[in-house]
Amino acid sequence: MKALGLAVVIFAIAGGAGFLVPADLQMTVVILLITTLGIIASLFRSINRIEKSFELGMYFILIFSLVVASMADVRQFIAASPSILFYVSLVVFGSLLVQVILSKIFRIDTDTLMITSTAFICSPLFVPVVAGALKNKEVIVSGLTVGIIGYAAGNYLGVMIAYLLSGL
């Protein structure tokens, strides 16, 4: 309940701040402020030690993902532009190839490669499942770490790229 209450407070602060900026910037400000306040809050020991907070966050991410996925119509997606499907496939498999090459160069073991690629491509939610299948619980921390960092960095980079591309 503490973690949920803190999340509601962070959301309320970000949502309130969204009303202080022009309408075209509201969503950007809210998303980046939620991310920033969440990162700041996680730096406090009393907050980052709240039990089951990670599981609660993953639950909400899963619900969000299911809701978004349920609204997708793959037939419209393919009919609208098959090149987008090609591009997304290229990005996913291309990034996986880059990760495999870098893992080979830096001599990163196969289990860590598999767990971090799962966190990057799927989400940290699947890290414990893959670690269980690998029978290697030691890689869970590295998978969760890169997944959570990926979520945070993805928010900032996604907004930055969106604004760069909209300026073209």
Image (tube, rainbow, N blue to C red):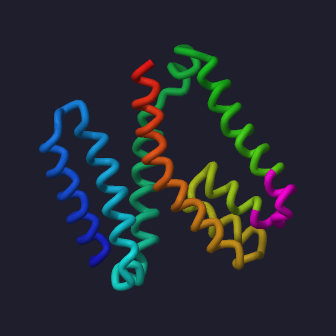
Q: Quadrant of the N terminus?
A: bottom left
Q: Quadrant of the C terminus?
A: top left
Measured along the vertical axis of the image, is residue 159 above or below residue 63? above
Left or right: where 48 falls relative to 151: left
Measured along the vertical axis of the image, is residue 66 above or below residue 36? above
Q: Residue at x 63, y 18 (%)?
A: 83
Residue 82 on image: x %, y %: 62, 17
Say which of 121 and 35 sits in front: 35
Left or right: where 47 falls relative to 88: left
Say which of 92 and 75 sits in front: 92
Residue 94 on image: x %, y %: 74, 38
Q: Residue 111 colored magenta? A: yes
Q: Residue 74 colored magenta? A: no
Q: Residue at x 47, y 34 (%)?
A: 161
Say which of 157 and 117 sits in front: 157
Residue 163 on image: x %, y %: 40, 31
Q: Residue at x 65, y 69 (%)?
A: 142
The quarter of the picture where residue 44 lies is bottom left
The quarter of the picture where residue 106 lies is bottom right
Say which of 125 and 88 sits in front: 88
Examine the residues drawn in magenta and state their main secondary structure: helix
Left or right: where 55 falls relative to 127: left
The quarter of the picture where residue 63 lies is bottom left
Q: Residue at x 46, y 55 (%)?
A: 152
Residue 29 on image: x %, y %: 27, 45
Measured along the vertical axis of the image, is residue 114 above or below residue 137? above
Magenta range is: 102-112
Q: How many marks?
A: 0
